[in-house]
Image (spheres, rainbow, N blue to C red):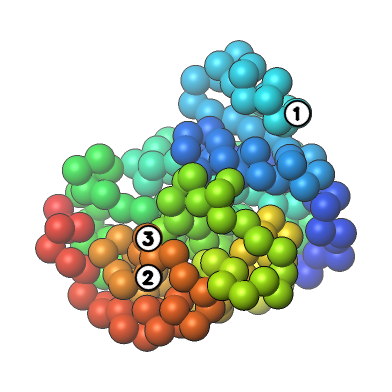
Amino acid sequence: MTTSAALTLGRHDMKIGIIGAGNIGGNLTRRLTAIGHDVSVANSRGPETLTDLAEETGATPLPVTEVARGAQVVVVAIPLKAVPKLPSGILDGAADGFAVLDTGNYYPGRDGRIAEIEDGVTESRWTERQLGHPVIKAFNGTYAHDILDKPKPKGTPGRVALPVAGDDEAAKRTVRELIDAIGFDTVDAGGLDESWRQQPGSPVSGLVGDTGAITKALGEASPERPADFRA
């Protein structure tokens, strides 16, 4: 794996590719286009099924094999079971120093048993290995409707914060700046091997709170996966 270089970008002029147009992917498309980013979006069913979302947002629907081309940020917002099925080389052609934002969670009832995760590998580390590129974990514990309903200007008391984990500091900075631009504070949740602190069943998962509340919840997390989230 290579470490991405720092990106020198304006906050509202990035080219962003989103893989997945479900609840999270769809609402990120809505929010990111609303603040002026150039967004392309793809799903497993083909661009012709994204006409309504494209007309609503101005995003460009593309085949999944093309959505990362030229992208400075690639968002992966699909079930974990679908990640290994992504086309080989899907990230080829992305911009130099691009960041990958992983929003996924492991749900055995949906994804089947993934042995590495059951054995203790964090979900996003597993995703990173499938993609062959460093990832930054964020939005995995965020309710989709909050992406549209909760944004506030920077400095507003009680502004909702999101945990962000990852090893690549330049990519993490890019993602944190992007999240700030769409209306949320962020808390650095450490490296990817610490991202169990924000996996399903953790105190921070689904928590709507400010930076203090998010920091406290991250500190209360246990590395043991709750029984409800094991195969």
Q: Is residue 191 above or below residue 33?
A: below
Residue visible at 43% across and 51% down in the picture: 143
The reply to whether the C-beta atoms of the residues labelled 3 and 2 are less than 8 Å apart is: yes
Distance in Å between CA atoms under marks 1 and 3: 29 Å
Separation of marks 3 and 2 at Cα, in angstroms: 6 Å
Mark found first going from the N terminus, 1 or 3: 1
Are the residues flagged by discs 2 and 1 in contact, CB closer than 8 Å? no
Mark positioned earlier in the residue sequence (2 or 1): 1
Q: Secondary structure at mark 2?
A: loop
- For marks 2 and 1, give the CA distance: 33 Å
Above or below for 82 versus 151? above
Q: What SS does tag 3 mark?
A: loop
Q: Is residue 15 left or right of residue 211?
A: right
Residue 226 image position (x, y, % from top left): 18, 66
Mark 1 touching mark 3, by CB under 8 A? no
Indicate which disc residue 195 carries.
none
Left or right? Give the position of 132 relative to 227.
Answer: right
Amino acid found under the numbered disc labelled 3:
Gly
- Tag shown at residue 58: 1
Secondary structure beneath label 1: loop
Quadrant of res 220: bottom left
For disc 3, the marked residue is 206
Q: What is the three-letter code of the residue carrying label 2?
A: Val
Name the kind of residue labelled 1 in the image.
Gly
* Screen quadrant of the N terminus: bottom right
**Residue 19, horizontal then vertical, whole percent:** 56, 38
| Residue 204, placed above or below residue 18 | below
Q: Nearer the viewer, residue 227 or 166?
A: 227
Residue at the outermost front position: 157
Q: Quickly name the residue at label 2.
A: 204
Looking at the picture, tell me which residue is in the foreground, 93 or 12.
Answer: 12
Residue 209: % across, % down: 46, 70
